[in-house]
Amino acid sequence: MLIKKPADIKPSEITPESVYRNRRKFMTDSAALVVGGAVAGTAGVSLAQNGDQLKARAPVTLQRTAPAYWWGEKFNSIKPAPDSEPFFTGEALTPYQDVTRYNNFYEFGMDKGDPSSNSDEFKVDPWSLTVSGEVAKPGTYNLEDVLKPVDLEERIYRLRCVEAWSMVIPWVGFPLADLIKQFEPTAKAQYVEFETIVQPETMPGINSRFAIVDWPYREGLRMDEAMNPLAFMAVGLYGDFLPPQNGAPMRLVVPWKYGFKSIKSIVRINFRETQPNTTWNDLQANEYGFYANVNPEVHHPRWRQDMERRLPQTLFSRQYIETRLFNGYGEHVAHLYDGMDLARNY
Ligand SMILES: Nc1nc2c(c(=O)[nH]1)N[C@H]1C(S)=C(S)[C@@H](COP(=O)(O)O)O[C@H]1N2
Ligand SMILES: [Mo]
């Protein structure tokens, strides 16, 4: 974001073969600890119950594996998105190939194709989550224990990157509030801070001499933002597990804010009284604010924010559309900022 302009996707980056190969590798790893169940099948055979609906939305045949042991049966009973905003949009979905081959995940490199090409070795199992700060129940939890009480649902959200491109993604996950409540934040918890894993042996961007980030990648929300029903923890997309490049095994999705708030591969959640430091704000405060609400009237110092390039973009359709305040979710989140000057608190 800071150094390169968004590059166009090269046709070579979106071949189904390479998508397939990359995904197979990841799934073999996660299938290694599966307790029972078939190892692989296609979406057509093994997506149960609401599977037909998800499948109908999928532009590619999904390769389906048995869930890693910590998912249990959850991926077989994903509650479908309703057919109305805000948990659904009638806009065309961005194809799976684009969602998984055009990524920002600087831990794996800075080019859009780097996260999918360089994440074959990424390890998600075992995964633990450390909870600290202003909570009654701090500790280090195994991910499977944190996930036990949650129910998975599908949400189809717009994702608007600060670089002025956007996608429409069918996520699978659960409300962030459902996770937070488990730890019983105290009255002093005004902000929540998140950190991404640092796994240098599998993340070539970490020790790269081009690295500009002071790892771990960090993000944060005000507590009322975090508890808003739209704030979502994603563990999958297109009815399947998250691939590493999209933030496996669990990442934040905050659809009314620029994409950089939606931190990936989370290992730490800290509850605080004061506003936390965040990665992009630390790097360039005049360009990337703490709030980072999508706002067509507040431009980035180096480019405008009133239009966006909706992916996929082809030679025949540039797909430029107007950017909406709060990414079109204002009805549900604008009240969070009553009385605040959005141009100052960008
Ligand atoms: N840890 C981490 N999280 C991250 C990033 C990153 O570089 N590292 N990039 C962010 C940015 S700028 C965007 S636009 C979204 C992209 O999510 P996607 O690749 O799943 O579309 O992830 C966000 N989360
Ligand atoms: Mo972004």
Image (spheres, helix red, strand yellow):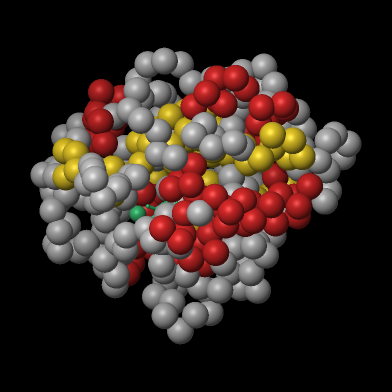
In the image, 181 versus 39, the foreground residue is 39
Q: Is residue 4 left or right of residue 221?
A: left
Residue farthest to the front? Answer: 316
Q: Residue at x 13, y 53 (%)?
A: 304
Q: Position of residue 108 (x, y in %)?
A: 52, 67
Q: Position of residue 231 (x, y in %)?
A: 43, 35
Residue farthest to the left? Answer: 297
In the image, 326 versus 161, the foreground residue is 161
Above or below residue 323? Residue 162 is below
| Picture mark count | 0
Q: Is residue 88 left or right of residue 250?
A: left
Is residue 209 visible from the viewing direction of this image? yes
Q: Residue at x 81, y 40 (%)?
A: 39
Taking the image as four quarters, which one is ligand 1 found in?
bottom left
Q: Is residue 239 left or right of residue 339?
A: right
Q: Position of residue 70 (x, y in %)?
A: 76, 40
Q: Position of residue 21 (x, y in %)?
A: 64, 56
Is residue 292 visible from the viewing direction of this image? no
Q: Residue at x 34, y 23 (%)?
A: 90
